[in-house]
Image (cartoon, rainbow, N blue to C red):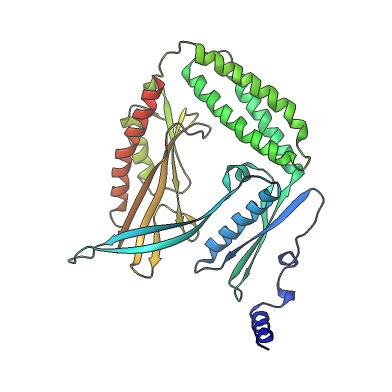
């Protein structure tokens, strides 16, 4: 009797089967596609739950390819210091449990892997996401990537310089990612035809790298090296201009077209995605304003040339003054990263 009552209660919380998409109960099947589903608890911010479910769906597709994926639960303590006008600063500790599901480089680099649909079940407090891998599209796109790598290498010609060495290092990283994706895809039988050309390109790049590493290359002239500013958010008026001025203050050229280096700022964000500054509501400390970013100097193709450093600013009451704090962080870290890069290139 108790069991019957429990089953009745559970069924009452579920939406009728007619309202739930069929793929929640059974994955679709289609020639040339590999499907998987991911779920997440429906939290206060539905957008974040949808993102989490979508990441898990992509992970499940890759897991079906027997790839190594990353997903873990982390526990951390965050302490926020709040100070209101005329009052003493107060520190509030919060124990945060995060389900850090990361799709990882292998899944992110795999073309043709998309989230097709999502479904939110408010009664069950669950978000569902359906993802699939298009095997034909994946193989075709990976072939195009290999062609671009070959063209990038041949454009370098026979020049012997450290800048060519930079570019070859980026090409090597591109080959590494491509090789992982081809190996992943080949578990389905697709993309096998790319392996001979991929190995030939790897051999050619390795030979060119050996030649450059054995040569007596002159140091890089950073006064003739151009850097561009890139970000995953729209920077506020004046901030981009400020960043360009910091590039020139460090002895480089600021140029958006065909730069050798990139000042990359990757921001985290609020409920709807990355933001320069976002508001965070906490049950203990109220509203705080946050800026969370990673600063990295990369090669023009995106390969990291330096370590990544975090820029984290937290402030209560209002976001006033946070831009000035951001500038102080840039003035602290950018010269240091470029100094480390220059030292390694001499």
> As rendered, which of 87 and 71 lies closer to the eye?
71
From the viewer's perspective, is 251 left or right of 23?
left
> As rendered, which of 247 and 75 lies closer to the eye?
75
Residue 230: x and y in percent read 46, 40
Residue 205: x and y in percent read 61, 21
> Which quarter of the figure has residue 190?
top right
Q: Where is 292 relative to 179, above or below?
A: below
Q: Residue at x 67, y 30 (%)?
A: 146
Q: Residue furthest bottom?
A: 1
> Which quarter of the figure has residue 251?
top left
Q: Where is 5 relative to 129, above or below?
A: below
In the picture, which quadrant includes the N terminus?
bottom right
> As rendered, which of 235 and 34 lies closer to the eye?
34
Q: Residue at x 63, y 28 (%)?
A: 149
Q: Residue furthest right?
A: 31
From the viewer's perspective, is 288 left or right of 99?
left
Q: Residue at x 36, y 45 (%)?
A: 239
Residue 210: x and y in percent read 55, 16
Q: Residue furthest top?
A: 216
From the viewer's perspective, is 41 left or right of 65?
left
């Amino acid at each position: 009797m108790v069991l019957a009552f429990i089953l009745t209660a559970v069924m009452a919380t579920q939406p009728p089967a007619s309202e739930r998409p069929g793929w929640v109960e059974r994955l679709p099947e289609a020639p040339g596609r590999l499907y998987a589903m991911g779920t997440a608890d429906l939290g206060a911010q539905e957008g974040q739950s949808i993102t989490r479910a979508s990441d898990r769906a992509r992970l499940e597709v890759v897991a079906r390819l027997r790839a190594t994926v990353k997903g873990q639960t982390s526990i951390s303590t965050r302490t926020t210091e709040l100070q209101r006008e005329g009052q003493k600063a107060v520190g509030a500790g919060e124990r945060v449990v995060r389900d850090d599901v990361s799709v990882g480089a292998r899944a992110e680099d795999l073309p043709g892997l998309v989230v097709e649909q999502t479904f939110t079940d408010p009664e069950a407090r669950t978000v569902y996401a359906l993802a699939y891998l298009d095997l034909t599209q994946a193989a075709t796109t990976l072939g195009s990537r290999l062609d671009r790598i070959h063209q990038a290498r041949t454009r370098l010609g026979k020049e012997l310089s450290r800048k060519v060495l930079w570019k070859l290092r980026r090409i090597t990283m591109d080959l590494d990612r491509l090789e992982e994706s081809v190996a992943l895809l080949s578990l389905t039988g697709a993309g096998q035809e790319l392996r001979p050309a991929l190995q030939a390109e790897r051999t050619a790049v390795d030979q060119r790298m050996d030649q450059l590493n054995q040569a007596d290359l002159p140091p890089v002239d950073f006064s003739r090296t151009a850097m561009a500013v890139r970000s995953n958010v729209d920077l506020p008026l004046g901030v981009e201009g400020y960043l360009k001025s910091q590039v020139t203050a460090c002895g480089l050229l600021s140029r958006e077209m065909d730069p050798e280096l990139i000042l990359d700022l990757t921001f985290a964000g609020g409920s709807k995605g990355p933001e320069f500054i976002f508001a965070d509501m906490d049950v203990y400390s109220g509203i705080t304003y946050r800026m969370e970013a990673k600063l990295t100097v990369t090669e023009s193709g995106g390969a990291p040339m330096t370590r990544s450093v975090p820029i984290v600013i937290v402030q209560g009451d209002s976001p006033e003054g946070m831009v000035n704090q951001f500038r102080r962080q840039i003035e602290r870290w950018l010269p240091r990263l470029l100094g480390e890069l220059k030292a390694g290139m001499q």
